[in-house]
Amino acid sequence: MAAMLQPQIILLKEGTDTSQGKPQLVSNINACMVVADVVRTTLGPRGMDKLIHDDKGNTTISNDGATIMKLLDIVHPAAKILVDIARSQDSEVGDGTTTVVLLAGEFLKEAKPFIEDGVHPQNLIRSYRTASSLAMNKVKELAASIEGKSLEEKKSLLAKCAATTLSSKLIGGEKEFFASMVVDAVIAIGSDDRLNLIGIKKVPGGNMRDSFLVKGVAFKKTFSYAGFEQQPKKFLNPKILLLNVELELKSEKENAEIRLSDPLQYQSIVDAEWNIIYDKLDKCVQSGAKIVLSRLAIGDLATQYFADRDIFCAGRVTEEDLQRVAAATGGTVQTSVNNIIDEVLGSCELFEERQVGNERFNIFSGCPSGQTATIVLRGGADQFIEEAERSLHDAIMIVRRAIKNSTVVPGGGAIDMELSRYLRQHARTIAGKAQLFINSYAKALEVIPRQLCDNAGFDATDVLNKLRQKHALPSGEGAPYGVDINTGGIADSFANFVWEPAVVKINAINAATEAACLILSVDETVKNPKSESAQGEAAASVMGGRGRGAAFRGRGRGMRRR
């Protein structure tokens, strides 16, 4: 009785929301399954697109898992983990963002009945981690290397990897055209894998096939002053001067006061300003450069001065474009026009200004270091070009990864089915509950081929049964068989060139398992709401003594209270 009358101990501030135990875990799992359901239909070549309309009125049409997850404003703390793994997959390998979210959701879905039956989450986590490392080792074992091939063979193999990625995007209809363009762009930048060396410029109008690749740099004509029309628009083997200097007539910034005794002295002060800019322009001309680019403004005086001397100039070039020109032409950006030597000038075989759609483009091609490429994208609607850019970003990442880690695995759900079969077989050799957990992990991996079938409108059960039968052949010849999207049956993914780099699959399995284990290991959420009184106090303290002091002081002087 005495125990019952003891006062309750209040540890947390009033209004704090604490939910814990099994219901909390099940609630987190449900939230993650809802997020996975959002991107579920975007998987694969027959996946649907999502139209996302944000509060600023911007409309985005996308098929890319990471983009959709980023634009969904998810507030549930556990479900945010899925957004993070989609982002990490996107930055690490570029593709497989939908796959990673789906797998994590499916692992949790399979774990849910066990949690409800009272299994301790740590047992599940241990088994999932074991299954994940077994699966990753199996992927490495099944992967085929594309190393040691000639450049032409390698190009065609890389184009197949890029085509597999692009097949699930909006521009899938032109995947061969874009795949070869992406491979050329990635090979052009060589071993330097900074992504910003491949520029993608968007020009509305025309159709997709009007897109082209410049092995060099292309950027939109910058704002220009009078005199620009008189400048030559084409050069062969020009020298290029890159500046971070303003070539404009500037009036005195400081509020200086000058006292003159003679009006002629005023002229000398005005002349000094003009002499400074003419001196700068002379030094640019004497350097021997035929093209002058600057990150800052090049004014009308400078434009006319250069035009009279057959020099092309462009001011207000963006930082990114200027850096790419520097990398391509071998020039160095100068912050002063004094002492310009030949070593800091860049060069290229051909410079021309060309009309692309509605825009004028400055194009530098045949660059000596050649370590940049620019893809100029054409298309009807702005949203379409935006999505094409995101798709090409994925393909570029995939080709870069395939060059670095030159092993590929069969796509189309083949590798997932093979891993599932291998784990089921392995589970039979384990005594105890772990057998059930690894079995459920194996079942979860089948979500990829199942979803591919559902999205294409095929009977998933029928196709999966055929795949299971094929993968269960003792000879192992069924390992590369996956879903055939065109016929609704099954086909050898390797023979059909549906390939993806092994690193994509390894990363996806690893990230999805990590996320599932992380969510399973959380058993309590403490949400600490800011009570209204606390907010009021905070606002008062921000106002500080300033507001209050002024009010009191004012009233003390006999002013009326408002």
Image (spheres, grey):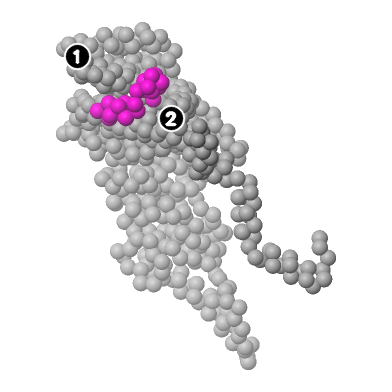
- Taking the magenta stretch, the answer to whether it contains residue 17 is no
In this rendering, which labeled residue sits more in front, label 1 or label 2?
2
Classify 455 as above or below 28.
Answer: above
Q: What residue type is labelled 2?
A: Gly
Q: Quadrant of the C terminus?
A: bottom right
Separation of marks 1 and 2 at Cα, in angstroms = 47 Å
Q: Which mark is residue 477?
A: 1
Helix or strand or loop: what does disc 1 sit on?
Answer: loop
Q: Which amino acid does label 1 sit on?
A: Glu
The magenta segment: 108-130
Residue appearing at x 49%, y 61% in the figure:
296
The answer to which quarter of the image holds residue 476 is: top left
Work out whether residue 386 can be spotted.
no
Decide which of 448, 239 is in the foreground and name it.
448
Q: Residue furthest front?
A: 1
Decide which of 338, 465 is in the foreground and name it.
465
Helix or strand or loop: what does disc 2 sit on?
Answer: loop
What residue is shown with label 2? Answer: 21
554 vs 541, left or right, is right
